[in-house]
Structures are given as C-alpha cells and as structure tokens.
Amino acid sequence: MTGGGSIRPCLVYSAGNKEDEEENCPHSTQFLADLLLTTPGELFQPVVMEQCFSVSRDDSAPRTPPPPTSPPHVLPSPRHPPPIPPSSPLSALTPSPRQEQRSLAGAMVDVSKWPLFSLLSTEELATVRQACVFGISANEAIYITHGNEIFVFGLNSSGCLGTGDTLSTIVPKKLDFLRGKKVVSLNYGSGPHVLLATEDGSLFAWGHNGYSQLGNGTTNQGLSPVLVTANLQNKKVTEVACGSHHSMALTQDGEVFAWGYNNCGQIGSGSTANQPYPRKVTGGLQGKTAVGITCGQTSSMALADNGEVYGWGYNGNGQLGIGNNGNQLTPCRLIALQGLCIQQVRQQPNVKLAADIVYATVDQNDGHHILVSMHDSLMTQMFPVFQIVSGYSHCLALTDEGLLYAWGANTYGQLGTGNKSNHLSPVQIMADKERIVEVAACHSTHTSAAKTQSGQVYMWGQCRGQSIVMPLLTHFAATDDVFACFATPSVVWRLMSMEHDDFLTVAEALRKEFDSPETADLKFSVDGKCIHVHKAVLKIRCEHFRSMFRSQWSEDQQDVIEIGQFSYPVYRSFLQFLYTDTVDLPPEDAIGLLDLATSYCENRLKRLCQQIIKRGITVENAFTLLSAAIRYDAEDLEEFCFRFCVNHLTQVTQTGAFWQVDGAMLKEFISRASRCGAFKN
C-alpha cells in the first residue's frame, strides 16, 4: 500500500471535508445496511465484508481536463483535454478472436436491470441478443436482435441514435443500415458519438462530430450511420473504442487507427492537431501486432499479442502507468507493468538457460531469487497481459495468470488499494483473492469490478456516490450488473450479450419438464386426463407426497394415481406450482385450488390463491368468493370479500350468487353487515 497518512480500519463512506469524514465513516456493517437501501434486492453479504482502510484524505480530485472554450478548429493547450461529461463505456481492452480460446464464458446478463429496458415488453426483451446503454444519464440504448436487426431508443443527444433526426423516442426505432450483418463491436463517446463494426469488417459511425470523431473529414453532426472508409480500404475492422471525443479501430491485421480530438496526443500522431480521418498509429506500435484497444476519456491504450501494453494521450493522473504524469503524443510502452509481471517467476534449480539469452537474478530476501530475462520478447511472452480496461482516469490490467494491477486516479478508491492516493505506475491488488478472470471499467465512470474463477463478483470505486476503497464482494453473477446497479451513470462497460447456447437453469429445466411423458415416472389421472410428473420432484417439493411415497400407502406402488376429489384444472395447476412456484388460474378455479392447498397444508399456495381471488373479485362473484373463504377458513380473504360486498351491497344483493347461499350464511352476513352500519341509510 502506498500513500501517506494514518490508517484506520474503516471504509471511506463520503467525500466530504475532514470533519464530515469522521462522521460519515461508520462501522462496515452499518455501511452495508445503508448501501442496501439504495439497491434493488439483497446485493451483498454483510458477513463477507472485506477489510477496508482509509487514510488521511487528500482533498485534490483527479485532474480532469477542463472543457474547451474554443471552436473545434482552434487547438487548446496540450495539457488541457476536452470536456468530459461522464458517459462512455465499452472501453474494455479484451482479447481479439485470436485470443478467445483463453477467455472464459461469463454469466448471462439480465438486460432488464438497466431501467431503460424496463420500457420493453417481455416479447421484445426475448428478441434481444446484444445491447448497449449509454448517454450522460444512461438515457440512450441500442439493441440488436437475434435476427441481426438494430433498434434504438432514448434521448437522442447529438443524433446519437442514428435515426436521421435529433428527436427523442420512447418507442424503439429500427435502423436499416445493417442489412442482416452481425455486429462484432460497438462503442461510444461522450458527445455522444457511436462506432459500430460488423462481421465483414465494415465500420459505421454517427452522432456528435464536433472534433471529426466520426472520421468523415467534417465536423458536421452525423444524424445517420455512415460507412467509414478513409485509409481503411481493404482493411477489416474487428474492434472499436471511443474516448470522450476521439475514436480508435483495430483491424484484423493487428493495426491500430485513431482519429478525432487530439489536444493531449490521444491520437498518437506525435502532435496535438485534430485528426479528421482514421490514421494508423505507429511510434512504439510500429511492427507490433495489436490484439486489443481501449480509451480513457482523453487517453488511449493498446495491447500487443505478446502481452505488452502501450499508452498515449493525457496522463495528468498517471493513467498511462509510465511512472510520471506527463502527456505522451506517441505510444509509450508500460515498462513497469512488465516488470511487475516478471517478478512472479521464481528460479528453479533445474532451469536450463539458452546460451544466447542473458539472465539476471535478484535476491528477494526470502531465500528465493527472481529470474529476469534481459531479452524483451521472451520476458513479455512469459507473463503477457490478458485484458486491460480504462476507467474515467484509471486503468486495470489482468495478466494471463489472473493477477490484477491498477494505476491512475484514485480519488474514489477506484484502484482498490485501500486508500485514495493516485498511482503513476501499476500496483497489484486483490493478491489475497482467488484467480481473477475478468475486470471491468468504463471511461464514463470511476467504478471498477472484477470476477473470480469461482464466479464471485467484486466492486470498488465510486458506487452510487459512495467511495469503496477496497474490492467488495457482491451477490452479482456478472460484472455488468455492477454497472447497471451502482455506476453513475448506469451505463454498460462493454457490448452486452444475451446469447446463452440454449443453457437452462435448474428452475427453467424443471418448468420445461412438467407434464413431459418422455421423462416422467408417474401419472395422475384426473377427469379422464393424465398429468405426467416425477416422483423425486414431488417428494422434494411437497410434504403430502413425501409421506405418500415413503410410507406404506398403496399409491407408492402405482404407476397411475386416480384423483377424484379435485377437478383437472385445479389439480394440474397444483402440480405445475410444484415445478414453477407460480399459479395461473381464474378466481373461480382458484377457489378449488385454495381447497386443495388447505387439505395438503400448502400454506404458500394458499396465500397465492388468496391473492388471485382478491385481484379477480367482481360484483358478480363476490358472494361466491366470500362463501369459499368462510368454508376454507381463510380469515384474511374472508374479511376482504366481506368488505367488498358491503361496499357494493346494492349490486351484490341483486346477483344470483347472493340468493343461492344457504339461509344460515345469508342471515349471518346480514347480521354482520348491519353491525358495520351497512343499513343505516
């Protein structure tokens, strides 16, 4: 841990003044309780709260480039990057197709966790294959269907929806430019502007273009998707990345192209002149084969196929990781990162050294020596970086051995080091955790996340306005969920995918196998109709069947069990409930199911039936439902139905159901209604 100040075992809760810090630095369990109030559902396990530390706080926020005060054609100072309204994710530097065999499939993403997608119907959500939520307030969305159709909806700032206008839309609109092509990469900036690459290598762009970030040679707003071809002829684009107002593309040949705003050198051209067309990035990348790209707000990074990492552009917070905070106009290799990675090799007694390679050993004062190759290519091949992601002004790097490093701005604890001190060079974090398989950050937020080999998801940094300075274990299944529920704004950090190769959860598999003759080992015959079930499921889910199949009941030896006291719809609904936890019956049939639930002592089912009856009560069936509630001793339901009948007394007394009840019940109802003052008028 670096940075000065006295260490206290607590979690930094607020970014107020020093007096506020003392007041807002509660016990970690109370912090979790407060945090849970801001989230949907139980997202954390308080019992697994990680040990966190705060240090005497440095009041300086991460240096953020001030907004440009001049028109696009006037170049600002190279030390002052462009305006950075938070709102651009997908800045993950992930493996190219050549590296996919090393990546692990993540948990499925639930797109409905993003509030914007709650506007879609269940049927529309079922068609979504890929999705992106972006915008200053996460107010824009793009999604691609299984049929490779692209739809957009939301605020439409700067024409970023590509609909040909700047009108907002709450109803998804279809864009026709894809023509059935599959999307392989999508990203956006802070304007916002959008880049999209298809499987045939085509590159499209639209949205904000004040700095030529669309790569079409103009600064005119792009209201519709246009094909970007300048300097990319015969090139196949496989990945795109956006900074606040600059763009990058990676080709199948491992070349990196950049264009747009360049006041801090983020284009990598060696100058600070804006770049109106895609330009190949050379310098330190010359002769290298890139396999990934990522953008910070005004910085750029590339990952080479040998694990080397290169960065250029704005470096005021150390986000390039090169040991200083000076801007870089051309790609600069992160030497410190390679040095950190190589230190994980311990010399073994039987190591055979090649004659043409020079090695050095460094004593670690623990009885071991580190083996260091002075041959650059061998050194980087031994411990290559596997994934890099860029946050607003910080970076995370994951090696192929699952080691995680962080550097850059740390005002919100986004480096996960336990304090808020910036780091100009990579520092290892989460060393005490199991192997990390995925890291996440996006350049519009100060939030970080990571996923371990066993599927545990951690988050840290700015989370719903709170500063979490150490990785915190969550209940999430995917790193995407962290950004849906805790990032500000709640944008995505990568193009989300809902493809799942027909995988079924346990609940989905049970639902699918209900009443399936192919796998069932037992049948119920009701009203001459058969219902196919599985003994094991019934025994697990219902005490009645557990007793039936464990004792000397005659039914235990039968392949077909006859049911006479309940109707087919009622009994089928009961068995289906045991497979699905849901009931789908009209109120009149729910009365019969309520009878069954009472007989079988299924209290949860009984409550569900009462809810169905309450929601389906009408003047015509109210007295029938009241009679059933009394008969089945459902006191809460009885009170509800009685109140309904009294409130609609004139209409209820004119129904056939009212006069068909037995005299004793009718007399009791009139007496009770009278005591409630129903006949005063």
Image (spheres, helix red, strand yellow):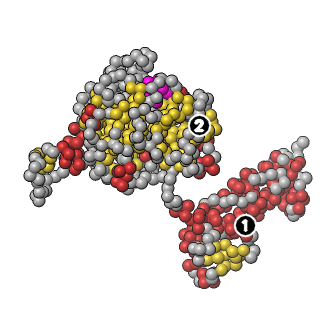
Please name the residue that numbered disc 2 is placed on.
153
User: As drawn, which residue projects farthest toward the left?
Assistant: 355
Disc 2 and disc 1: Cα gap in Å?
42 Å
Residue 399 visible to an observer of this rendering: yes
What amino acid does circle 2 point to?
Phe
37 or 377, which is in the foreground? 377
> Is residue 209 a member of the stretch shown in magenta?
yes
Q: On the rendered image, what quadrant is the C terminus found in?
A: top right
Main secondary structure along the magenta-highlighted residues: loop
User: For the point 42% across and 32% down, which residue is it?
Assistant: 230
Q: Secondary structure at mark 2?
A: strand
Q: On the rendered image, what quadrant is the N terminus found in?
A: top left
Marks 2 and 1, the one that precedes in the sequence? 2
Please name the residue that numbered disc 1 is placed on.
569
User: As drawn, which residue projects farthest toward the front?
Assistant: 234
Using the image, determine if residue 606 lies above or below residue 136: below
Q: Position of residue 572 (x, y in %)?
A: 68, 68
- Relative to 268, is 125 on the left or the right? right
437 or 237, which is in the foreground? 237
What amino acid does circle 1 point to?
Pro
390 or 6, which is in the foreground? 390
- Relative to 533, is 466 on the left or the right? left
- Relative to 78, is 673 on the left or the right? right
Counting other residues with Cα less than 10 Å from the Cα at mark 2, is it few (<14), some (14-19), or many (20 or more)? many
Q: Which residues are magenta?
A: 208-214
Q: Secondary structure at mark 1?
A: helix
User: For the point 11% across and 53% down, which residue is it?
Assistant: 354
Q: Position of residue 325 (x, y in %)?
A: 27, 27
> Is residue 204 a member of the stretch shown in magenta?
no
User: For the point 35% across and 51% down, which residue is it?
Assistant: 99
Image quadrant in which you'd find residue 467: top left
